[in-house]
Amino acid sequence: MRAQGQPQAVKFTLPQVPKIAIYIVGFIPAVWLFYEGINDRLGADPMRYLEQSLGLWALRFLIATLAITPLRQLLKINLLRYRRGLGLLAFYYACLHLLTYLVLDQGLDVAAIVADIVKRPYITVGMATFIILIPLAVTSNNASVRKLGGHAWARLHRLVYLAAIGAALHFILVVKSWPPEPLVYAAIVATLLGYRLIRSLIKKPQPRRRAA
Amino acid sequence: MLIRPAADIVPSEITPREVYLNRRQLMGAAAGVALGAGLPAAADAAQLSAVKGRFSTDEKVTSREDVTTYNNYYEFGVDKAAPAKYAHTLKTVPWTIKVDGLVGKPAEYALEDLIKSSALEERIYRMRCVEGWSMVIPWVGFPLADLIRRVEPQGSAKYVAFETAYRPKEMPGLQSAFPVLDWPYVEGLRLDEAMNPLAILAVGLYGETLPNQNGAPIRLVVPWKYGFKGIKSISRISFVEKEPPTSWNRQAANEYGFYANVNPAVDHPRWSQATERRIGEGGLFVKRRPTVLFNGYAEQVASLYAGMDLKKFY
């Protein structure tokens, strides 16, 4: 794109770490939470603390996944190779969050769980968000990209935007009043999605340019 | 003299007193501070002498640690650990309560004058939070009815309104640019509810003066209602004719009613109230237990609501 000789934008390159490191580091909070939980060090209401913390980590990894593209486009920081790992970590934490709710919180009481899903907006939204994440996790491998074709795969994975909105909304709906924390997360999600929207609006009418 | 040094304390047998007293001593806080003529200095928990009161449950009492570190007291932050961390800044000595409105003896009362003629009682009550958890707490206090009688409400007084102290300099939650509630915190009861013998003003728990995070120096305890009705650090009590505004009702009227009676059949719009988790029971593997109408105090309070549609007056 850039003609030779022109000053290059400073490119920040990170030392490449093996992708597996993302998973190892990413699972530290979960291992720590379960360890502290088993040893009864999660405060007065440990089940609730575990449940909320796992959900929060799911949202954090979802946000990290969404941050990859703006970081690359705006700051030239390329972390694309870790995006799949971050997205999967979001999914794994959502699984643990859901399992904690189903098993530890509700004690697998099917009637109570079904009533929750039908009647409680925050559970409805949370469950829908989790369901959206499933096809994304299932197709998060190279074979799926080849099978679906890059274009269709990318379109499918735009569902992550919906999942992020769902996750942020789920957090806001569960709290009393309007405490700052869920609003801060919602603002981050709104910024990351708003950035994409604005960029797509600006870029749309761009004529195709071919290198001469 | 009602508040006395250790000599004749009624010990809470169910309480692992030695455990927390030891920890207290290690922390350098003196247990059993002599009180002399007044209430204790703010930070030091002092022993209260109290007789065993009526209506106490024999259920297992929630640990002092949990009761004093897991608090909703938004004036000190929305995190449940925040009040225990920050509430020490609240100056509770001296403390006055303004009594006004439709009342025979309106005045700015010194706290010790308001409680001196009431015998302190230990009341071990269940506490059910609107969020779906519960505790069993050994309060020390006196019947709210005692105070009400003493200030002689007029015949036209139908409700009692309460107000929490408004101290931005001592309450970090009030300094927030995005207030969680309209401050000061306000609550209210119908006069007959307030006169019910179950309703107490607590000045202590676990045989000692109230820790600040639990609403020192004086708070309301109405165990058949959700915890948020139990207004903390009361600085004003008004007798009024019309139903007074209440903080959570103002915040979200469809979610928090004026009555806020514990009722498993009336869900919070966003979550079920059918069950609850008892704090300190089972750790991670806590089992939900069914929530009981009026938090199990129907015998004492159900008649207050005879003929009322509890789904409408939630």
Image (spheres, coloured by chain):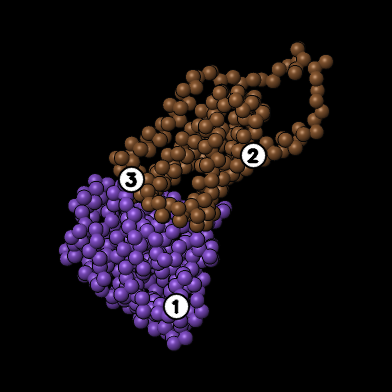
| SS of the residue under disc 1 | loop
Q: Is residue A188 left or right of residue B129?
A: right
Q: Amino acid at mark 3?
A: Leu
| SS of the residue under disc 3 | helix
Residue at the farthest top position: A5
Residue at 24% over, 51% down:
B20
Q: Which residue is mark 3?
A: B284
The answer to whether marks 1 and 3 mark residues whose Cβ atoms lie closer than 8 Å is: no
Q: Amino acid at mark 2?
A: Leu
Q: Chain of mark 2?
A: A
Residue at the farthest front position: A147
Picture colour for chain B: purple
Q: Which residue is mark 2?
A: A193
Q: Chain of mark 1?
A: B
If the image is split into quadrants, where does the N terminus of chain B sit? bottom left
Q: From the viewer's perspective, is residue B125 above or below residue A46?
A: below
Q: What is the distance, in whole Å, between disc 3 and disc 2 at their CAs? A: 36 Å
Q: What is the distance, in whole Å, between disc 1 and disc 2 at their CAs? A: 49 Å
| x, y percent for residue B305 | 40, 77
Q: Which one is in front, A148 or A122? A: A148
Q: From the viewer's perspective, is residue B298 above or below residue B61?
A: below
Q: Which label belongs to residue A57?
A: none
| x, y percent for residue A59 | 52, 40
Q: Which residue is mark 1?
A: B308
Q: Chain of mark 3?
A: B
Count neighbours of disc 1 (C-alpha within 10 A) and say few if under 14, some if 14 to 19, many if 20 or more.
Answer: few
Q: Nearer the viewer, mark 1 or mark 2?
A: 1
| x, y percent for residue A134 | 52, 37
| SS of the residue under disc 2 | helix
Q: Which one is in front, B279 or A98? A: A98
Picture colour for chain A: brown
Q: Is residue A18 left or right of residue B34?
A: right
